[in-house]
Amino acid sequence: MKCTNRLKQIITILICMALALTTLTGCGSKAYSFEYDRGRNNSGFSLAPHTAGDTADAFALGLCVTAKDVTEGTDVDMSAATAAGLFDITQKKVIYAKNVHEKLNPASLTKILTALCALENGNLEDVMTASANVRIDESGAVKLGVAEGDTMTLEQALHALLLKSSNDVAVLIAEHISGSVEGFAELMNETANRLGATNSHFVNPHGLTDPNHYTTAYDLYLICNAAVKHDKFVEIIHTSSYNSVYHDKNGDEKIMDMANSNAYIKGEAFAPNNVTVIGGKTGTTNAAGNCLVIYARNSAGNPYISVVLQAPDRTTMYTEMTDLLGEI
């Protein structure tokens, strides 16, 4: 009798162990993944013994990663810009890095994240109506000239945002997507956090100067890397000029006629022979200096993202960016 009871206990234990393993593994190999969360201590974990094949990939597995400057094997003159980076998307390799984790004012490079949030949360055919908040009074701020009651589609607005760098249109997009600039800033920070851009904080959709609005060259790589996964984003930044018509509150037509502000696209700056610049985003304020993010491909079609922040002037910015692209 004692032997029978002992046998029953052993069988019960084995059944419980089997059920536990089934719960964990699903009776087979299964992949797990999760987005980055700055509130969680771990970015990768094992759900079962490695022999079972059930592990979650580390968050950064598909990303270029560096914790320090990277200059070995390069010949880059980046003496003027405060920060810069060159990232090989295919090889997941940081080719060059200078102060890539230093928090700096991004100026209109902010609009890359604004476009990403709009593409993820809106529809290109959405018709947006401007509120009185689109009025931008800051001296020197680039504007399309949107007035209260004006209407345009999200697709039109994204062209004005990325090509002309229109600050009033950035507010129009923010209020359409989130109801307010403040609500959209929350979305921007949530999106940045999800991408791992945790050294950044955004308070507006356009990048006009604010002490609580900052990012890093590395975080801009992460944000741009997500944005270029959207075909419409790549299409727009590669567009040399754009013409369209939107409407005022009375239904009358207003002309939208603009050229890409990127000198490589305009034919005013020239990349190395083996590099094709697909597009990018410029940004300039007194606080940020001259900033530039470029999305490019080599002769084999492999993609790269390069960032130059806080160059002293536009000419130096493009000179140092071209030198950086020469490392591709």
Image (cartoon, rainbow, N blue to C red):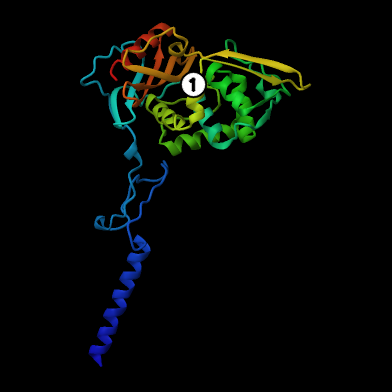
Count the labels in the image. 1
Quadrant position of the C terminus in the picture: top left
* Front residue (pair 196, 161): 161
Q: Position of residue 254 (x, y in %)?
A: 70, 16
Which residue, given by chain and number where applicable, does mark 1 sit on?
Answer: 237
Q: Residue visible at 52% across and 23% down? A: 236
**Amino acid under label 1?**
Ile
Q: Residue visible at 36% across and 42% down? A: 59
Circle 1 SS class: helix
Q: Position of residue 256 (x, y in %)?
A: 64, 16
In the image, residue 2 sits, relative to residue 172, either above or below, namely: below
Q: Position of residue 176 (x, y in %)?
A: 64, 32
Residue at the limit of the structure toward the front, as seen here: 300
Horizontal side of residue 201 vs 22, given as left or right: right
Q: Quadrant of residue 15?
A: bottom left
Q: Residue visible at 46% across and 13% down? A: 265
Q: Quadrant of residue 77?
A: top left
Q: Position of residue 26 (x, y in %)?
A: 37, 62
Quadrant position of the N terminus in the picture: bottom left
* Front residue (pair 193, 146): 146
* Front residue (pair 319, 98): 319
In the image, residue 108 sits, relative to residue 1, either above or below, namely: above
Q: Residue visible at 60% across and 34% down? A: 123
Horizontal side of residue 45 vs 268, given as left or right: left
Residue 202 can be seen, yes or no: no
Horizontal side of residue 154 vs 65, given as left or right: right
